[in-house]
Image (cartoon, helix red, strand yellow):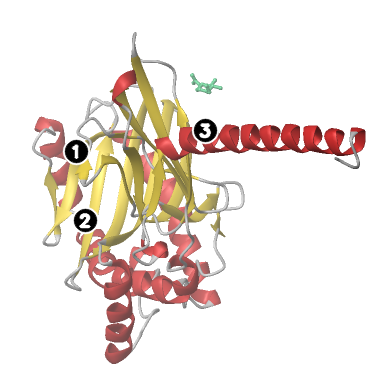
Amino acid sequence: FLAATFLHSLFLPMPFLLLIFCSFATAFQEKISFKMIHTASFYNDSWVKIQNSAWLDDLQTHGWDTNSGRIIFLRPWSKGNLRKEEIKELEEFFRGFSVVMPQEIHKFASQWKFKYPFEIQVTLGCELNRGGAIVGFHQFAYQGSDLLYFQNNSWLPSAKGGTRAQDMSRLFNQNHAMKETVQRMLSDTCPRFLLSILDAGKADLQRQVKPEAWLSTGSNPGPDRQMLVCHVSGFHPKPIWVKWMRGEQVQQGTQQSDILPNADGTWYLQVFLDVEATETSGLYCRVRHSSLGGQDILLYLEHHQGSVGWIILAVMVSLVLLTALAFWLRKRCLFPHPP
Ligand SMILES: *[C@@H]1O[C@H](CO)[C@@H](O)[C@H](O)[C@H]1NC(C)=O
């Protein structure tokens, strides 16, 4: 019944697919994947919690309402070019999957030595490579480690899956209808849906938003040392290059945080440098991003101190001038008509 889902659904003529691909190959220059994640948390032999979601790389595109058994479309373009009936079919598939799969797992739990409580994760998706090829993938994990994967129309045990994985793959491979359906989803349905949402979401996915950057100092890592922090926020898309530098030299100790999501769909990052407090001269943070069109952001530590120095100097000069003016005026007032 998997077959009933996307099949015959997303037919796009070949030249159109090529066009979509070419525009994305130049815009992303990277791999991009679409995948569905099914997570089942088995608390005991009668209680399981199901979560389904779908992701375009790091961006969640679909959620799942367990109560109503309906797909939640998280982006305006998450439907791609799916028609209403196709969405209904998909929902039926996921509802079925979310009921049948846990029942089977409960049934075989003792045979496969699954110990309650445990977690099963299933991913099914496809990846568009730089060269334009789209490769499907499908994995099955127990307690966070891979057990099975799908390749060349059959289930295979993962290297570290042991006899449990061998048992399971043997059993799964007996279900020919299921294998055929999975194969079709990986090689046909998923690639077409991936291209379809890439096209529908083009304006959003390819938008260029410039980062803002600023410097701060973190807590001192040790006596006579300083932690310099370069913050970069609000950029899109995600790929970015940020380094602490001196002249043309990237500083060896540069460390980077994870790239974290902002609520508005842009990204945030911190880049650290642990230095001797006396060795900070000439250091700057350099930010390179596609939205900046080759005009890197350069933030110098010294401009900070330098500008404070200039302000102090300007204030002092003004004070001196004002004092001089006051003296001159006073003199003019006291002695209006010098002899
Ligand atoms: C299974 O776990 C749920 C949630 O923790 C609990 O409410 C239920 O009583 C448990 N059932 C059994 C048979 O242990």
Determine the CA span between mark 1 and mark 2.
Answer: 18 Å
**The C terminus, quarter of image:** top right
Q: Do the residues under discs 1 and 3 have CB atoms within 8 angstroms?
A: no
Question: Which residue bears the numbered disc 2?
Answer: 175
| Sequence-first tag of 2 and 3 | 2
Q: Is residue 81 above or below residue 37?
A: below
Query: Which-is-in-front pick, marks 2 and 3?
Result: 3
Q: Amino acid at mark 1?
A: Leu
Q: Is residue 265 above or below residue 46?
A: below
Residue 266: image location, x then y, percent: 50, 53
Residue 180 in the figure: left or right of residue 102:
left
* x 57%, y 47%: residue: 263
Question: Which residue bears the numbered disc 1?
Answer: 147
| Sequence-first tag of 1 and 3 | 1
Determine the CA span between mark 2 and mark 3.
Answer: 77 Å
Would you identify the image quadrant in which residue 326 lies?
top right
Q: Amino acid at mark 3?
A: Gly
Examine the rendering and report whether any part of residue 49 can be seen. Answer: no
* x 47%, y 71%: residue: 201
The secondary structure type at the circle numbered 2 is loop
Would you identify the image quadrant in which residue 26 lies?
bottom left
Q: Which mark is on residue 309?
A: 3
Q: Is mark 3 within 8 Å of ligand 1?
A: no
**The N terminus, quarter of image:** bottom left
Residue 228: image location, x then y, percent: 38, 29
